[in-house]
């Protein structure tokens, strides 16, 4: 039986709205997230405005559109400037950093990110960090250099930092402590365990949970969810990747965020609306409000 790559139906709307603080709505092929494989190479494509309309209809109040290279970061900044439901995060993804470095363009790419960081409605630097799963040993020096540069860009502009951390927990934490983490630091698609969650909590770092927390084999994430202070919780889709159970195999989208939120609330034994209100407050503390800067006319 062929795999269904169509978008799932709309979930029941949330009573209290919430934000998707990490998504990739740029047109495919999306280069913004080198950390995960798409849930189907022949997936249906939805225009980003249709994605946002669907999200609004189920109580997802807004999104942070995340870049991972020069092109996707420019796209994020430009679309956020004219779309009131979108803020932007800009960066060179850790798996892209060695490629730019090999081409002799890493400094150029970092300069572009530094310029984009000054634009209206760009509220975060990310996703940046370390990825030892996809990048071999010879590319890691470029990852470290890029990560440290992004940390400094975030601090220089008073922006949040969104971290991509894959198979690199100890080195990411060591770098943050050595260089000095920005005041608002987010572990996107949190992938650590309960012990790491305690380290994050001790340092005031936010933990953003994606659809992976619903996966059957993700006990470490559920342990971390139990440990994480509620005031440091965020939620995301990382769309079009990491579609939550029971919809795995189909493309993810911001409008599917209620599935992950409801799972988190159920696991924590708390009311969905109460958790949504807490996460919404947390999200606005990290990124500011979506209406605090005007959008420009088309």
Image: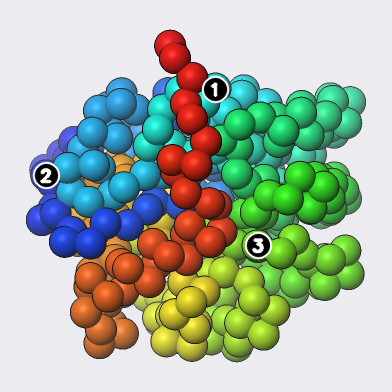
Query: Residue placed at 32% from the left, 39% from the top?
Result: 40
Q: Quadrant of the C terminus?
A: top left
Question: On the picture, is 275 further left or further right than 57?
Answer: right
Where is residue 185, by image quadrant?
Answer: bottom right
Q: Report the front residue among 251 and 281.
A: 281
Where is residue 88, by image quadrant?
Answer: top right
SS for callout 3: loop
The Cα atoms of the two marked residues, 2 and 3, are separated by 34 Å
Query: Residue placed at 79% from the left, 53% from the top?
Result: 155
Which residue was labeled with disc 2? 9
Residue 92 image point, x, y percent: 70, 38
Question: On the picture, is 24 further left or further right than 117?
Answer: left
The Cα atoms of the two marked residues, 1 and 3, are separated by 23 Å
- Above/below status of 113 relative to 63: above
Which residue was labeled with disc 3? 184
Which residue was labeled with disc 1? 78
């Amino acid at each position: 039986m062929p795999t269904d790559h169509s978008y799932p139906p709309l979930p029941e709307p949330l009573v209290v709205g919430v934000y998707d603080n990490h998504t990739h709505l740029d047109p495919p092929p999306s280069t913004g997230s080198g950390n995960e494989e798409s849930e189907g190479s022949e997936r249906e494509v939805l225009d980003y405005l249709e994605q946002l309309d669907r999200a609004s209809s189920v109580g997802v109040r807004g999104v942070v559109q995340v870049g991972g290279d020069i092109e996707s970061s420019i796209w994020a900044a430009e679309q956020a400037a004219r779309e009131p439901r979108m803020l932007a995060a800009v960066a060179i993804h850790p798996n892209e950093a060695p490629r730019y470095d090999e081409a002799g363009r890493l400094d150029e790419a970092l300069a572009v990110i530094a310029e984009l960081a000054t634009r209206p409605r760009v509220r975060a630097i990310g996703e940046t960090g370390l990825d030892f799963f996809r990048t071999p040993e010879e590319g890691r020096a470029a990852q470290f250099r890029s990560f440290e540069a992004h940390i400094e860009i975030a601090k220089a502009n008073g922006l949040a930092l969104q971290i991509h951390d894959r198979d690199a927990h100890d080195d990411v934490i060591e770098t943050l402590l050595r260089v000095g983490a920005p005041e608002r630091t987010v572990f996107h698609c949190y992938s650590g365990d309960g012990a790491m969650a305690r380290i994050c909590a001790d340092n005031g770092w936010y933990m953003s949970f994606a659809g992976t927390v619903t996966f059957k084999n993700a006990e470490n994430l559920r342990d971390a969810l139990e440990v994480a202070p509620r005031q440091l919780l965020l939620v995301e889709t990382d769309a079009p990747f990491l579609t939550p159970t029971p919809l795995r195999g189909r493309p993810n989208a911001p409008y599917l965020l209620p599935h992950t939120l409801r799972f988190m609330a159920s696991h924590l034994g708390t009311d969905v609306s109460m958790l949504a209100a807490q996460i919404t407050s947390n999200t606005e503390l990290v990124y500011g409000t979506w209406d605090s800067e005007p959008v420009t006319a088309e």
